[in-house]
C-alpha cells in the first residue's frame, strides 16, 4: 500500500499573550465605533491593558494617535471592547497600528500584553502591530 507522504499544512501557532481582533466598524452619531474582541491566552489575568494605537486613513496618512483601554483581561476568557472615535467616519479608516502597550498590569510577567501579541481583523481595515 502506498502511503500518503504529503506534508500536513503548517499550523500558525496561537499567541501565548493577548489576541486582539478588530471585529466590526459602525458609524455612530458623528463617530466611528470600533469593536474589538480580545482574549488573554496566558494563564495569568491581566488587570490593566492599555494599548497605544495609530489610525491611518485610506491614503496611508496618520489621522489620529490614541489610547485604547481594554481594562481587565481574565485568563482564557474573551472580552469585547468598543471605542468611539469622535469626528472619524469609518469609511475613511484604512489601517490601525497597535504601537505597543502603554500600560500593562498583571500579577506575573510584565511583558504579557506585548509578548505573543496576535492581531487580526474581520473588517476591510487592517490591524497590524
Image (cartoon, rainbow, N blue to C red):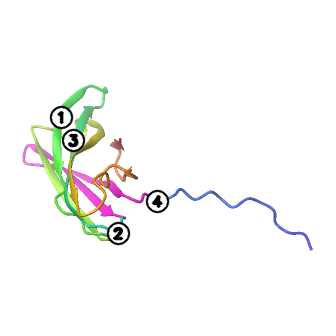
Q: Give the CA distance from mark 2 to mark 4.
A: 14 Å
Pointer 2 and pointer 1: residues touching (CB < 8 Å)?
no
- View extreme (right): residue: 1
Q: Position of residue 123 (x, y in %)?
A: 34, 49
Q: Provide the secondary structure element on which disc 1 rests.
A: strand
Q: Nearer the viewer, mark 2 or mark 1?
A: 2
Q: Give the CA distance from mark 4 to mark 1.
A: 28 Å
Measuring 69% from the left and 61% from the top, which residue is drawn there? 8
Residue 100's place in the image compared with 115, above or below, is above
Q: Give the CA distance from mark 2 to mark 1.
A: 31 Å
Pointer 3 and pointer 2: residues touching (CB < 8 Å)?
no
Mark carried by residue 43: 2
Range drawn in magenta: 15-41
Which corner quadrant holds the C terminus? top left
Q: Give the CA distance from mark 4 to mark 3.
A: 22 Å
Count of numbered circles on the image: 4
Q: Give the CA distance from mark 1 to mark 3.
A: 7 Å
Q: Provide the secondary structure element on which disc 3 rests.
A: strand
Residue linked to disc 3:
52
**Disc nearer the start of the sequence (2/1):** 2
Q: Give the CA distance from mark 3 to mark 2.
A: 24 Å
Comparing 17 with 9, the one in front is 17
Measuring 31% from the left and 51% from the top, which residue is drawn there? 111
Residue linked to disc 4:
14
Q: Position of residue 43 (x, y in %)?
A: 35, 69
Comparing 31 with 56, the one in front is 56
Amino acid at each position: 500500500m502506498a502511503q500518503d507522504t504529503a506534508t500536513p499544512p503548517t499550523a500558525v501557532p496561537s499567541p501565548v499573550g493577548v489576541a486582539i481582533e478588530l471585529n466590526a466598524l459602525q458609524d455612530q452619531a458623528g463617530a466611528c465605533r470600533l469593536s474589538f474582541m480580545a482574549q488573554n491566552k496566558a494563564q495569568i489575568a491581566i488587570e490593566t491593558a492599555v494599548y497605544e494605537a495609530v489610525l491611518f486613513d485610506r491614503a496611508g496618512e496618520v489621522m489620529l494617535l490614541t489610547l485604547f483601554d481594554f481594562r481587565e483581561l481574565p485568563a482564557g476568557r474573551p472580552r469585547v471592547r468598543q471605542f468611539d472615535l469622535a469626528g472619524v467616519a469609518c469609511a475613511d479608516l484604512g489601517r490601525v497600528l497597535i504601537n505597543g502597550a502603554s500600560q500593562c498590569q498583571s500579577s506575573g510577567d510584565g511583558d504579557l500584553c506585548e509578548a505573543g501579541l496576535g492581531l487580526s481583523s474581520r473588517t476591510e481595515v487592517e490591524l497590524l502591530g
